[in-house]
Image (cartoon, rainbow, N blue to C red):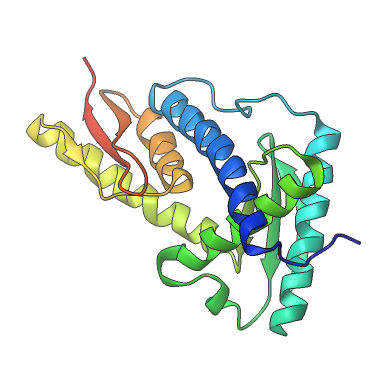
């Protein structure tokens, strides 16, 4: 059983800084690669299938512990998808775990990644989803991306989108890069990093 206890304040700060820096580099590298139309089927750092499954198991145990502490009911599925570990929580009354525009979900994902880092010593690109939020958000972002592409094609000018998380930017990049005549790139730094959709040269 995975230790679901939270680290002390000083320990948490040190560990989170190390894990967050490594993850930020990985996420930015993937985001930039996707934005440039590169291959996004694998993680920036090669990780074996067994290691990915191990990460998803650690994450599932950690999330289960959090749900117990919060007295929330939910079914937990663990899998590996597109070269990254994924944990999905399904059930009723889970909206508080998502928060406004997924802010709470993003924080829980970072805590779960930190739990993996504490146990394995390696950063993880775990994707945590609650109540199908990310699948629904993907559809919304696809519409945003297509709308931006239409404006670029109509006016011939770049369109800057609102700041987004790495997950959200990747969703937009995937849609834009599948269309002809336009390209997308990320600019700025977190938490105001955003996508610019522009005409292809």
Quadrant including the C terminus: top left
Q: In x, y percent, where is residue 56?
A: 77, 49
In percent of the image, x 72 and y 72: which residue is there?
A: 66
Is residue 59 left or right of 50 when viewed as pictured?
left
Q: Residue at x 51, y 32 (%)?
A: 25
Q: Nearer the viewer, residue 180 or 80?
A: 80
Q: Nearer the viewer, residue 8 or 103?
A: 8
Q: Which corner quadrant of the image does residue 53 belong to?
A: top right
> Above or below — where is 170 with respect to 95?
above
In the picture as drawn, the residue positioned furthest to the front comes out as 10
What residue is at 73 percent from the left and 37 percent from the top? 122
Q: Is residue 64 above or below residue 33?
A: below
- Where is residue 134? Give x, y as percent: 53, 57
Residue at position x 74%, y 43% in the image = 80
Q: Is residue 158 left or right of residue 21?
A: left
Report the quarter where the N terminus lies: bottom right
Say above or below: 38 vs 147.
above
Q: Is residue 163 visible?
A: yes
Left or right: where does residue 32 sit relative to residue 63? left
């Amino acid at each position: 059983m995975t230790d679901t206890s939270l680290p002390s304040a000083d320990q948490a700060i040190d560990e989170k800084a190390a894990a967050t820096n490594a993850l930020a580099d990985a996420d930015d590298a993937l985001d930039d690669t996707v934005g440039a139309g590169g291959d996004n089927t694998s993680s920036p750092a090669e990780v074996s299938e067994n290691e990915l499954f191990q990460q998803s198991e650690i994450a599932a145990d950690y999330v289960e512990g959090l749900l117990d502490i919060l007295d929330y009911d939910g079914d937990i599925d663990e899998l590996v998808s597109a070269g990254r570990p994924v944990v999905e929580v399904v059930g009723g009354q889970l909206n508080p775990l998502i928060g406004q525009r997924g802010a709470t979900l993003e924080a829980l994902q970072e805590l779960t990644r930190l739990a993996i880092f504490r146990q394995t010593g390696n950063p993880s690109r775990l994707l945590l989803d609650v109540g199908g939020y990310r699948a629904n958000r993907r559809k919304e972002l696809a519409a945003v991306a297509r709308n931006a592409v239409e404006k670029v094609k109509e006016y011939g000018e770049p369109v800057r989108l609102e700041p987004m998380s790495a997950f959200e930017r990747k969703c937009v990049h995937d849609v834009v890069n599948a269309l002809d005549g336009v390209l997308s790139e990320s600019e700025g730094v977190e938490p105001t990093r955003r996508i610019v959709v522009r005409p292809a040269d």
